[in-house]
Image (cartoon, rainbow, N blue to C red):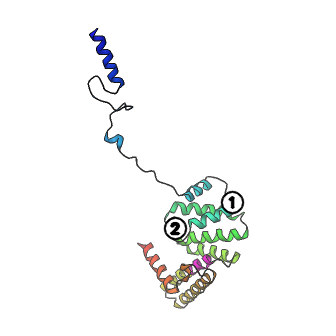
Amino acid sequence: MLKLASSILCLLLVFIGIGCGGRKRAAGLSQPVTASTLAPTAPTKSIHPDEEILAEAIRGQPISPGEVAILSDRMLSEGSPTFNNEKSMARLDILLNKSLNNAPRDVRSRLLRNLGIIHYHQCKYSLARQELQQANELFPRDARTHFYLARLAVQNGYIFQSKGLSKKAKGQFNLAANELELARKLEPSNSAYRQDLKSVMQKEKTRQSDLKK
């Protein structure tokens, strides 16, 4: 009888959360809480929505030339981290070239301009100049096209200068000044285009020095 009463008492204690050995257990926990179970999980790396759109497009997700132009405009805005991401730049290059075939004239000019911007930042200056000039022929009132043509002219001027061809260098610097003036007239509110030629030249020289490091 005493044994039966002891068994019933033990069952009651288990039911209310106390083991027969007298140790209280947290309700609903089959294992004791340890430092490892309380440790925070490592945060997952977030992917920018534009990067996801780009990746999907590369994998074959349908996207119109106009949408590619808008996407690349965003991803190639001044100061964008895209310029430091080789993978994203390569993907944009592929997508922009793929979209050129079926693009209407106004969209095609933006696609070519953005290809020129990519290749400028990759130091492929001849290719960048060709694409930007084509973009300018299609739509000569794009301020950003003129701004990058100015930057390319400065780079070309430095190349001639390094070869001792001062007259040709001066011609390129004059061309840069003209392109910069056109950009300024088309978008007078843009602070980047309000720079004088000396500021642009200094920034281009600094950029080249940084690239050599």
172 to 99, vertically: above or below: below
How many other residues sit within 10 Å of disc 1, few (<14), some (14-19) or many (≥20)?
A: few
Q: Regarding mark 1 in the picture, which secondary structure is present there?
A: loop
Q: Which residue is the site of mark 2?
A: 80
**Amino acid of disc 2:** Ser
Quadrant occupied by the C terminus: bottom left
Relative depth, front residue between 119 and 5: 5
Disc 1 to disc 2, C-alpha distance: 23 Å
**Amino acid of disc 1:** Ser
Location of residue 2 by image quarter: top left
Residue at position x 71%, y 64% in the image: 101
Tell me where the magenta segment starts and ends, as one range.
143-152
Relative depth, front residue between 36 and 120: 36
Residue at position x 44%, y 78% in the image: 206
Q: Regarding mark 2 in the picture, which secondary structure is present there?
A: loop
Location of residue 182 by image quarter: bottom right
Residue 11 image point, x, y percent: 34, 19
Is residue 150 inside the magenta stretch? yes
42 to 73, vertically: above or below: above
Examine the residues drawn in magenta and state their main secondary structure.
helix
With 114 as the anchor, is 3 left or right in this view?
left
Location of residue 91 by image quarter: bottom right
Quadrant occupied by the N terminus: top left
Mark closest to the chain's N terminus, 1 or 2 = 1
Q: Which residue is the site of mark 1?
A: 64
Circle on res. 164: none
Furthest residue to the top?
Answer: 1
